[in-house]
Image (spheres, rainbow, N blue to C red):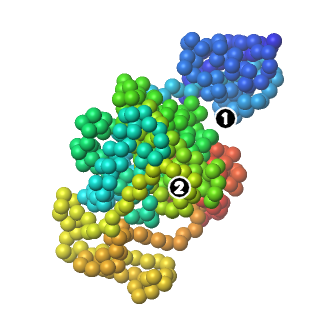
Amino acid sequence: MARKWFQLVGERGSDVTSATAVFVDIEDVFAFRDAVKAKFEDSHLAGIAAADLTVFANRAAYNVKQALEEDSPIGSFGGSEKDALIVQVPTQQSFVWKEPKPLVESIGAKWDFQNSLDLGNLSYAIGQHYQAWRDGKTDKRTHPLFVCLDGPGTGKSRLLDEFPNVLKQQVGVQGDPAMDELLQNAYTFKVTFENGTTDNYGISGPCEMIGTRMLYQLQDSLAWMAFAGQRTFHLDPSQAMTKLSEITGTALRKMCVILCVDNLQKLQHEAGSKNSQFYSAYATLCDLVNASKCWVIAIFSVTISQPLDDFLMVSPQWTEKLQTTSLKRPTINGADVFGPDDLFIMYCTSEATEDLRELPNSAVVDATCWEEYYGPFAARAFFTKSVPLPCINTSSQTQLEFVEGVDASCSARIAKKRLFTSLEDAYDKTKIPEQVLKRFHFNTGPR
């Protein structure tokens, strides 16, 4: 057996222990981590898995964050107290119940919700779903999965934002008192696959993609990239709901969870394949509404019908489609948002398509006729312009954050590490996923 010296440090580099040693039979990182975990499992490493420990050859390697791989041989590393291996311990994250952030944060979120839902059909579906869950039935034909299928910019995200309120204020009050009590005390999770969050930071599959995003809602100390990068937070939805039960003290059988998943079409799908991310995510949502210990009401949005149609061809799952509405003039508390002298500007930079051949490329549209121009898109204006990829070496941090998948911590890392000569150079220096870096060009000149 070989004796290996090591020192535990926290995520910010502070020493957790002084240098100490363990004996290992096999000199690789996997065996070494198990030995370290066994030595401190009742103290510094209580509740922390051996797999979540990060091992560095020495202090110099730690300073440049050059970690050893799981199957790396330790060899001569850790041979003395002076040249001890460094073992980084992840910070144990605390979780509390937090209301979800809205999926829509633009000015339109303040406008009165234009409810297009058929409350009669919705109330019936929710009532049947509750009775089947209460009676322990798991038949797919007795549990509805709600879906909002429509084109981009038609109000799907806003409908998902308002869906829990509709259930509590307009559906629950009409049904069984026990069902209403569950709805009034329901916990709502809002999960989105928009804005670059489909990037897979080692998360094994769509089931964990959803569960990890649910857990992410229960904290606010870590940004998404840092949170998703820690394997200990990769949970499936059932595990996330068990965590919710623990932190709220609510038994699973006395809990209602409303799960809203936005932009599911962002997940990869291959026609006819049961191994696609979309298919797996859809199957996960079906399992949740059909057989969870707590009462799960799930709704998701999607802009394309083919993946949905592929799934429904082979599954008897009760799928209840909800429609968005053709938007009318927006109001706030019933009052028209626009005054009589307001103008609506339509600005087009691309060539007019065949559908718009009778319209000018640019127009100032009077408030009395703007619906004629925009129809169901009256509540939205689109500014479309063909622009080159931004330069990773010269863009400001604000400009960097306009790129899908780049948040504030990511842009700060880019600004600190550049100049970059190539995508490979940027990846080596920043560890930002290549699929995000492909959204930049790498000109090293002044522009």
Residue 64 — which label? 1
Report which quarter residue 68 is drawn in: top right
Residue 411: x and y in percent read 53, 49
Disc 2 marks a residue whose amino acid type is: Leu
| Residue 2 seen by the camera | yes
| Residue 220 seen by the camera | no
Question: Residue sitting at 76 percent across and 15 percent down?
Answer: 24
Classify residue 107 as left or right of residue 50. left
Q: Which residue is the site of mark 2?
A: 312
Classify residue 140 as left or right of residue 169. right
Q: Which quadrant is home to the C terminus?
A: bottom right
Disc 1 marks a residue whose amino acid type is: Val
Question: Residue sitting at 51 percent across and 50 percent down?
Answer: 316
| Badge 1 density bin: few <14, some 14–19, many ≥20, Cα 10 Å | few
Residue 259: x and y in percent read 41, 43
- What is the distance, in whole Å, between disc 2 and disc 1 at their CAs? 51 Å
Q: Which quadrant is home to the N terminus?
A: top right
Q: Nearer the viewer, mark 2 or mark 1?
A: 2
